[in-house]
């Protein structure tokens, strides 16, 4: 109950404060590239329930049907100029706050994944689905996309096993540092296991 109350209070406040920035970003996306500025992608949440995760669109419209499909590399040619800036600053994740308000996500937890990835989970890896997915999490601040998928899952399981105020504060601190610095988004050789 306390965690949910914090999720609601923080996400509502953040959305209110960020609404001018969100509106400007949506306008910039529309000016550069046709299509909706909001991208919806089916993800799997707590207990395996599917939901549509909301993000600011950072690629050309219909990018999932072009080239590498759902796989995205750091210098992917489908990423727009506005999209590159949004990704570098993590502002593309702002609409995730609506998912938090709707109760589909939490501020902190494993990043939600697509159904095809969940279908490949081992029984141990399915423990990732025992809590709500988050906007940021232990794997996000300890290597993010630079890590092999299996290592990211292990980091998420580590978080679930040690979940508490201390690790949540550490995640928030590292997330703020990464976002403000605009770096380390695709780095992290040790994956947080130092």
Image: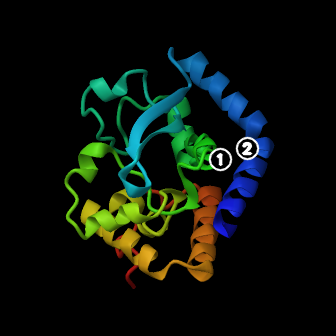
Task: Mark 1: give few (<14), some (14-19) or many (20+) Cα within 10 Å.
Answer: many
Q: Is residue 118 left or right of residue 51?
A: left
The label number, if any, that marks residue 101 in the structure image: 1
138, 157: nearer the viewer: 157
- The reply to whether callout 2 and callout 1 are in contact (CB within 8 Å) is yes
Q: Is residue 157 left or right of residue 36?
A: left
75, 40: nearer the viewer: 40
Q: Which residue is mark 2?
A: 15
Residue in the picture at 58% in, 50% down: 103
**How far is disc 2 from disc 1 in space, using C-alphas?**
10 Å
Report x, y in % for residue 84.
50, 38
Report x, y in % for residue 178.
57, 62
The label number, if any, that marks residue 26 in the structure image: none
Above or below for 74 versus 36:
below
Report x, y in % for residue 19.
76, 37
Sequence-wise, the earlier of marks 2 and 1 is 2
Residue in the picture at 52% in, 43% down: 87
Residue in the picture at 58% in, 63% down: 175
Above or below for 126 versus 25:
below
Helix, strand, or loop for circle 1?
Answer: helix
Report x, y in % for residue 100.
60, 49
């Amino acid at each position: 109950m306390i965690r949910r109350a914090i999720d609601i209070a923080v996400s509502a406040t953040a959305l209110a404060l960020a609404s001018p920035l969100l509106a400007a970003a949506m306008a910039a996306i529309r000016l550069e590239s046709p299509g909706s500025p909001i991208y919806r992608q089916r993800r799997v949440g707590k207990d395996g329930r599917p939901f549509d995760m909301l993000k600011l669109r950072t690629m050309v419209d219909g990018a999932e049907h072009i080239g590498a499909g759902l796989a995205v590399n750091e210098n992917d040619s489908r990423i727009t100029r506005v999209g590159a800036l949004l990704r570098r600053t993590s502002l593309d994740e702002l609409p995730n706050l609506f998912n938090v308000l709707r109760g589909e996500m939490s501020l902190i937890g494993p990043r939600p994944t697509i159904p095809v990835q969940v279908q490949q989970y081992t029984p141990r890896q399915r423990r990732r689905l025992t809590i709500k997915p988050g906007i940021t999490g232990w794997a996000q601040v300890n290597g993010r996309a630079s890590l092999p998928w299996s290592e990211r899952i292990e980091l998420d399981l580590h978080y679930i096993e040690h979940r508490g105020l201390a690790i949540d504060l550490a995640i928030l601190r590292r997330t703020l540092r990464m976002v403000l610095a605009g770096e380390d988004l695709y780095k992290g050789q040790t994956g947080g296991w130092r």
